[in-house]
Image (cartoon, helix red, strand yellow):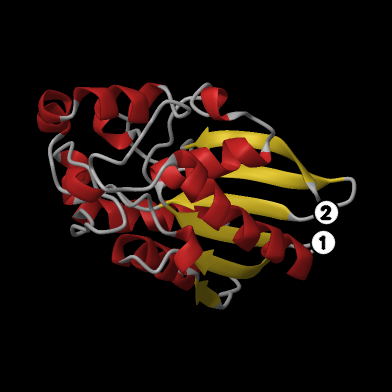
């Protein structure tokens, strides 16, 4: 079986400011985030990761590099564009409250109703678009590492959609497990023929030396 460790990137300035930060937007990681990446690495210090795959977006790439540098065995990192965050179009960089005011239907549906979210007006990706591009990458990783531990460093909204899809959730139910915190880890294993998955732990932040607040979660 393959054990997949899905890690959301460290907290950024836009996360703290409650701004949308998709594939077309990026902001610097907070100073505290580097320490939290080390805490994650220390938690998994003795885990033998065969490889780390990461989104090429800077906040995810730096998170992957920082974690890898502090593991006992430092695995190779590969960047995959399929692991990038949602393209959020016109919402990129906007504060949540401003999106709620200007694009109320998109705001509500992106957060709560994935099956109803239509990004046409804002020029972004749908949930199905993201699942369609991420799933082939994950299945190839499973095929290439059928009995090993692999870390995947990506983004909150994209990971939430993809992981719930792997676990068998339909579009209306993608949000039912709740959000993902910055520098959290969710562990999923393959079962049977490597085409099915089971959840080991969701949104683990037990290794972080602080309380999680609402600006951490997407």
Is residue 214 rendered to the left or right of residue 149?
left
Whether residue 204 is visible:
yes
Between the C-alphas of marks 1 and 2, the distance is 5 Å
Horizontal and vertical percent for residue 69?
45, 72
Q: Is the residue 80 above or below the residue 174 in the image?
A: below
Residue 50 versus residue 100: which sits nearer the camera?
A: 100
Q: Position of residue 117 (x, y in %)?
A: 38, 31
Q: Residue at x 37, y 49 (%)?
A: 86
Toward the viewer: 43 or 5? 5
For residue 145, say whether it is visible. Answer: no
Q: Secondary structure at mark 2?
A: loop
Residue of label 2: 1
Is residue 142 left or right of 75 when viewed as pictured?
A: right
**Is mark 1 in CB contact (under 8 Å) with mark 2?**
yes
Is 198 in front, or is 121?
A: 121
Name the residue located 22 percent from the left edge and 57 percent from the top edge. 25
Observer-nearest of 162 and 109: 109
Residue lying at 30% horizontally and 67% vertically, measured from the top left = 58
Q: How many marks?
A: 2
**Up-down relation of residue 13 to residue 169 (above or below):** below
- Looking at the image, the residue that sits furthest to the front is 120
Seen as rendered, the residue at the extreme bottom is 76
Which quadrant is home to the C terminus?
top left
Q: Is residue 193 left or right of residue 69?
A: right
Other-residue count near label 1 (Cα within 10 Å), few / some / many at <14 / 14–19 / ≥20:
some
Quadrant (top left, top right, bottom left, bottom right) of the N terminus: bottom right
Say the numbered circle drawn on residue 147.
1
Where is residue 103 shown, x and y percent of the image? 18, 29
């Amino acid at each position: 079986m393959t054990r997949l460790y899905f890690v959301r990137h460290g907290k950024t300035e836009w996360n703290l400011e409650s701004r949308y930060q998709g594939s077309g937007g990026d902001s610097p990681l907070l100073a505290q985030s580097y320490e939290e990446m080390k805490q994650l690495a220390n938690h998994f210090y003795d885990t033998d990761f065969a490889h780390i795959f990461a989104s090429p977006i800077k906040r995810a790439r730096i998170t992957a590099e920082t974690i890898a540098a502090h593991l006992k065995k430092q695995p190779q990192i590969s960047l995959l564009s399929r692991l990038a965050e949602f393209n959020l179009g016109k919402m990129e960089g906007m504060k949540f409250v401003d999106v709620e005011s200007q694009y109320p239907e998109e705001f509500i549906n992106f957060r709560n109703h994935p099956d109803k979210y239509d990004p046409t007006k804002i020029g972004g990706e749908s949930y199905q678009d993201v699942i369609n591009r991420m799933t082939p990458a994950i299945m190839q990783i499973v095929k290439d590492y059928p009995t090993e531990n692999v870390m995947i460093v990506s983004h909150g909204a994209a990971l939430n959609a993809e992981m719930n899809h792997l676990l068998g959730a339909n579009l209306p139910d993608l949000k039912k497990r709740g959000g993902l915190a910055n520098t959290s880890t969710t562990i999923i294993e393959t079962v049977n023929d490597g085409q099915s998955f089971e959840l080991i732990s969701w949104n683990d932040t037990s290794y972080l030396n602080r309380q999680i607040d609402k600006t951490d979660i997407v």
